[in-house]
Image (cartoon, rainbow, N blue to C red):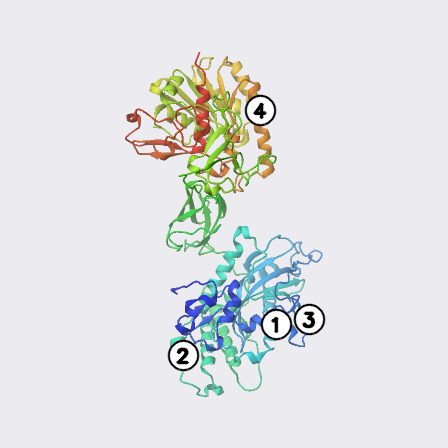
Amino acid sequence: MDYEVQLSRYAETSSLLRTDHGVRGWSLLVCLSSSERSCLRRVSFSHLQHHQTVNLLPRIIEAFSDAGEGLCHFYSQSHLTGSELPMMPHACGSTNQKLQVPQDPAGADRHSPAGAPPPALVAMVNTYVLVTSVKPLTSFLHDISVVTTNQEQRGRPIKLRNFLLQRLGPPTSHDALGQIKKVIGDVLLAALSTNEKQETLSRCVLCYQLLTFTLLFSGSITPVIVQVETDLTFSSLSRDTFDGQITKDLILEDTLHFLSSETQTEVRQYGGCRQTDGVCLSEDEFLLLLQFQRQMKTPSAFQLLYPSSSSSSSGPLRVSDLLIRISRYYELQRNQRYITDESEERTNQEPALSSSQDLSEGPCVDPLLRQIYSDPPLTLTPPFSPRVKEYRAEVTFDTVMVRIRPQPVSSACRVHLDEHRGPRMANYPVGLGNSRISILVTDDDGEPEPVVMTIYTVRVYRESRPSLPMFGDHVTCGFVQDCGLPVQPGRSCGLQPLIRTQSSLQTCSSGHVPGRWVVPCLSCSDNRTCDWREVAWQPDSCYHPLVDRPLLQDCLTDRKVLFIGDSTNRGMMYFLMERVNSSLEDWGKAHDTLVYRNLNGGQTLVSYSYYPQFWLEKNQRPTFRQALLQLIDRSRPLVNSNLTVLVVGGVQWLNTNHLRTVREVLNRESLSDVLVLVKSLGMGFHLPVDGIRSLSLKEVQDLYRENQNIITAAKHHGYEVIDTFSITMGRYKEFLQGRCACHFHEVEKFWSSGLSDDTTSTANTTGTGPELGSQSVVPDTDQEAWPKTSSYHVRGPVNQVYSEILLSRLCSKTRN
């Protein structure tokens, strides 16, 4: 709205509100609920200029303040009793009472036969009221309400007229709306009839107050007010869906547009009291009339609450009588326009509802977003604007998930995330590095497929774990699991001091030797003091030797390595291919069977089969036996020795039955002597992401026990095991892109002629140390082997660790 905005925590600390700036330094003061008292102390309402607006009316705030135990202050200052007003006396302030919707009368929730009277109205309705003047009283009702019924666990935002029309039908709904206005108007009048002497001290012509009136309908069309709050409240709306935030923003925007002042130039034309129509108007009163007249003629979401056009008065003509005349004039004008042209846009006071009114929205003609809501809130760059389509945002390492809900400008437009039929709101796992969120604004009106009108893109960058470089003395800390997800309740979590032993100079005899992550820190009690670039996997009593490239190439000569599993298994395959060939020339997110024959100078074959094919209907998915047989057939000829290697496993689908099937198939195909390596389970699916399964903490703990069963069964069959569950357990937050939060690798385009950051060699490259560094690989002596043109690189330190263990186990013995 072209205001220059200054933010301040307290009114007392705002430079614009200091006396040396004078009172002309600002036009609009918006005091949020947390700073309300500060504003009331600082702002001198009796000395405001005519152009200055504050979102507080002190008399309203005092009248509906809590006089004790929820008793409204204006009740304590008057002789009113609870029976004289349609309101509970103890309805003000933080009553902490749980408002309950009464049970429907018998049969009220059943469909009524044709011609029968409409069912009784039983609901709790939050209505939002804007008071623009105290004396005389002028107030407006926003068309959005929040309705709670016994059929709905949570409240829902809906246009008040639409709700009444749906529940009561055209004639009765009009009467009910009239009753709502009368009840709220009567209570406002009663509340302001006390303490009138304060009016002259706190006069502010353009000040306003937003209130929430909670109405209870118990079978009658006349409600009872059960709570009044001097702010916008949406406690009955679910926070997870952003409904409260969206509705609040909408009402606040409507309020600012409704009150935007155009009366300053007009008021200068008023030269003083001229006894017009028998009324001597002060400058304040004339300004009030001008503002009211403009609000009545301007289309908006607000409808007049008080004064009612049906109001009458006796005695001398007053300003309030002129307000009534203005409201009658515009009501008459609107009704006449509605009769002659029903299609013309109506202003804030609509005529009586009729059943012929179409509640649907029609086609999407303004395909823009009003706002992108997120939890936690994303700081978008550039700041959000409906006509800007590309955004960037950065989040901290600890932000592993963001909930997104874009809101369109027009309710006729629909929003889908990522694809045509995607949800309008979703939880996004935020992997380390870059993620992308696509927001499609579509027109779904009358089309079999949504028509994409506009696409917004938000690129989110998640920072790596904060790291403190080690320059001096440090201690070595170890950890098995993160305290944020205690997979093994009986074991310690987080960093623990690690005492180094000399017994770890022997090589490991298996890929599932228990171990832990180790990292240098200034203190094991604060993970922010650690150099996370140096984190490494250390088995408890041995080490996994790193295989340099010449040895790896020799080890894989004349061998065929078959992989069967999901994308995590595929990540290990691509790592092996890059390590043996010194580059990765071919890559794809394959979900079928692949065969690579060009590895190691044509001396090594690698093949892959994706399992399970979860996107197919269950009765159409190939069984594990079928997928394994197809992989074997595509990889033939095979020899029955450890020259043939089968790597089987994935995230969480593998169980002991699959290992039994492996044994049966290999025996039947005369391949019982091939080398089988089992990639055990891994972390993932631990975040509540829409559209896929989400594991509870107990289910993750059950996975650990299932993983132990798989290791035991694999050893029974004589298979090697890479325990990826233990390796990923402590670093579960370090997943990369993917909805499952289970990928610890990603493949990126690689242009450089040298090693990338992820393959920087460390001190531990000789293959004799106890640790396997997250960044440790064997350095190439032949730099010319690295490509000068584009190829691909498998990135991800956690995947690198368990893939290096795979290579170590592949080459642990001299081939027969």
Could you tell me the amino acid type at mark 4?
Thr
Residue 327 x %, y %: 50, 75
The residue indicated by pointer 3 is: 82
- The answer for how far apart the CA atoms under marks 2 and 3 are is 43 Å
Badge 4 or badge 3: first in the primary sequence:
3
Badge 1 or badge 4: first in the primary sequence:
1
- The answer for how far apart the CA atoms under marks 4 and 2 are is 85 Å
Residue 307 x %, y %: 55, 75
- How many tags in the picture? 4
Residue 409 x %, y %: 44, 56
Question: Which residue is depicted at the point 62% across and 66% down?
Answer: 92
Could you tell me the amino acid type at mark 1?
Val
Q: Judge left or right: residue 141 versus residue 272.
A: right
The residue indicated by pointer 1 is: 187
The residue indicated by pointer 4 is: 656
Could you tell me the amino acid type at mark 3?
Gly
Badge 4 or badge 2: first in the primary sequence:
2
Badge 1 or badge 3: first in the primary sequence:
3
Q: Is residue 254 above or below residue 806?
A: below
Numbered tag placed on residue 267 in the rendering: 2
Q: Local crowd at mark 3 within 10 Å, few (<14), some, or many (≥20)? A: few
Q: Nearer the viewer, mark 4 or mark 2?
A: 4
Secondary structure beneath disc 3?
helix
Viewer-side residue, 648 vs 682: 682
